[in-house]
Amino acid sequence: MAHEPIGTLDFHNLGFSYTKTKWNYLSRWRDGKWDDGILRNEDTLTIACTSTCLHYGQEAFEGMKAYRRKDGKIQLFRPDENAKRLQRSCERLLMPPISVERFLQAVTAVVRANAEFVPPHDSGASLYIRPYVLGVGDNMGVRPAKEYLFGVVCTPVGAYFKGGLSPVNFIVTDLDRAAPNGTGQVKVGGNYGASLYPHEAAKEKGFADCIYLDPTTHTKIDEAGSANFFAITRTGKLVTPKSSSILPSITQMSIMEIARRNLGMETAEQDIFIDRLDDYAEAGACGTAAAISPIGGIEYHGKMHVFHSLTEVGPVTKRLYELLTGIQYGDVPAPEGWIFPVDESNSLK
Ligand code: PLP
Ligand code: COI
């Protein structure tokens, strides 16, 4: 696939889809070590038909973004947290971990090489970065692969949920995406395979996505298929679900910190019972792709529960959105260690 001539890209009207960029990174693990990796133009892979990533789900990935500052410079948001989470995902699936240094080197090399695809500051868009690890090579039995690929590919994106800062609605599904003590806490392909059916069913009914309940009791909110969940209590506390089957979200832990530091709010990880939604004044989905997306209402057992409003973002959600995106785009001072500048000279190419 030829990459889009950069002049024809409308950065102000991007959705969340793949536009081919110029360079991606690829490294191979063989005989007990990762090679140095290369930047390459080709955005396809040739792998064995019996690769474990294809049959047994031996695959993990990350999602992160590069943001254009007002002064034109590019920055990453807490990329060391993505690196550490990928290590935990690799460990869970018996894949060789990538060091934090190597991860950051590969990600920054890809961003630098594709700097022209990082959307302008005022576009509301960003460069989405997708690091991934795959088990490859001949393998028929259910056992870990003998070879692995670590790749990083990127694409410019706009809003994940179509509403942007206008609320979107969710519906509770009866299905589960991850088991307690399964793989819900890591970012592996199998969790997303399991989420495709309930997600499509939700979309067919006009909802942005579905909400999963805790798989053991089906009484408490877990998360959405592609984002974490948060709510603001009627007493002004920011709460997020406490669960062993959800992905530890970097966005969620960041907004908890922002709420405490910048807004003096109380925060807690706690049970959020699906039959107690009246306790909450506002709710939202949060994640790298989703940023902060206000939730207008949640349908559960045929009944729609409306939070703040179906059409207007609530005041606390709006403030959290402004602070989070302000930090990510370099307009609001960030807590120490959150921002990782990417200078545009490239050593790997
Ligand atoms: N939960 C799921 C299932 C996700 O796919 C994501 C997105 O990465 C999140 C939560 C949010 O995580 P983060 O904020 O680290 O992007
Ligand atoms: C992300 O927010 O980075 C995700 O991974 C969510 C989705 C696009 C899979």
Image (cartoon, rainbow, N blue to C red):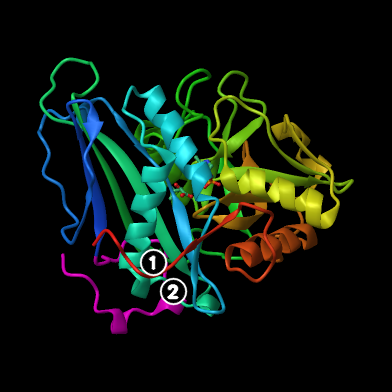
Q: Quadrant of the C terminus?
A: bottom left
Q: From what the image shows, is residue 185 above or below residue 287?
A: above
Q: Measuring 10% from the left and 33% from the top, which residue is drawn there?
A: 49
Which of the two residues, 11 or 311, is positioned nearer the viewer here? Answer: 11
Which portion, as a residue range, is magenta?
1-22
Q: Position of residue 184 (x, y in %)?
A: 49, 29
Taking 190 as reference, is 280 left or right? right
Q: Quadrant of residue 154 in the image?
A: bottom left
Which of the two residues, 226 or 122, is positioned nearer the viewer here? Answer: 122
Which of the two residues, 273 or 301, is positioned nearer the viewer here? Answer: 273
Q: Position of residue 182 (x, y in %)?
A: 46, 20
Based on the picture, tell me whether residue 18 belongs to the magenta stretch. yes
Q: State the SS at label 1.
A: strand
Residue 119 disc label? 2
Taking 90 as reference, is 160 left or right? right
Which residue type does callout 2 highlight? Pro
Q: Main secondary structure of the magenta part?
A: loop
Q: CA distance from mark 1 to mark 2?
A: 7 Å
Looking at the image, is mark 1 or mark 2 earlier in the sequence? 2
Q: From what the image shows, is residue 79 above or below residue 218?
A: below
Q: Give the tally of numbered discs.
A: 2
Q: Position of residue 301 (x, y in %)?
A: 62, 36
Q: Are marks 1 and 2 in contact (CB under 8 Å)?
A: yes
Q: Position of residue 162 (x, y in %)?
A: 51, 63
Q: Measuring 64% from the left and 63% from the top, which residue is drawn there?
A: 327
Residue picked out by circle 1: 156
Q: Measuring 16% from the left and 52% from the top, which residue is drawn there?
A: 44
Which residue type does callout 1 highlight? Pro
- The crowding category of the residue bearing disc 2, from other C-alpha atoms within 10 Å (few below 14, some 14 to 19, many at least 20), is many
Q: Is mark 2 within 8 Å of ligand 2?
A: no
Q: From what the image shows, is residue 294 above or below residue 213?
A: below
Residue 317 disc label? none
